[in-house]
Amino acid sequence: MRFPSATRSRIWAIYSWYKKNAPGNDPPVGVKKPNPWGLYDMHGYVAEWCQDTAHRDYTGAPSDGSAWIDAKATTKTERVIRGGSFADEPDVHRSAARTFVAGDARNDKIGFRCVKDK
């Protein structure tokens, strides 16, 4: 479903921290509305580290959903991050958006998503 730009902006403001509404650093957790599954901060809080090493396309990727790790990977090998952080524009706040960073990178805009089951 596509929404007009003004509507998208209002929706992002309700559910997501992004470049225009974040305070410029790690925003507080749990302030935005949860998604339909009750999970908070799933869009925009941090970009997600992935186990996969960087590959420029999906040729040769595992078809079973397992991580795609180069056998010669080191701690400096580029890794995949997905989604966007509080410092990004909303258009990268989706799991299909990906980029690569050094495996030993340190950045407060990249992290893990932790979910606690009741």
Image: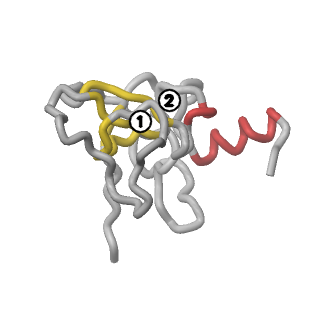
Q: Earlier in the sequence, mark 1 or mark 2?
A: 2
Residue at 81% from the left image edge and 45% from the top image edge: 2
Q: What kind of residue is marked 2?
A: Ala
Residue with the most extreme right position: 4
Image position of 19 (left or right of 2): left
Residue 58 x, y percent position in the rendering:
48, 42
Q: Which residue is mark 1?
A: 27
Q: What kind of residue is marked 1?
A: Pro
Report which quarter residue 77 is drawn in: top left
Choose between 42 and 64: the one closer to the eye.
Answer: 64
Asked whether disc 1 touches disc 2, contact meaning CB atoms under 8 Å apart, the reply is yes
Residue 61 x, y percent position in the rendering:
41, 48
Residue at 39% from the left image edge and 47% from the top image edge: 29
Residue with the most extreme bottom position: 118
Residue at 54% from the left image edge and 32% from the top image edge: 18
Q: Which residue is mark 2?
A: 22
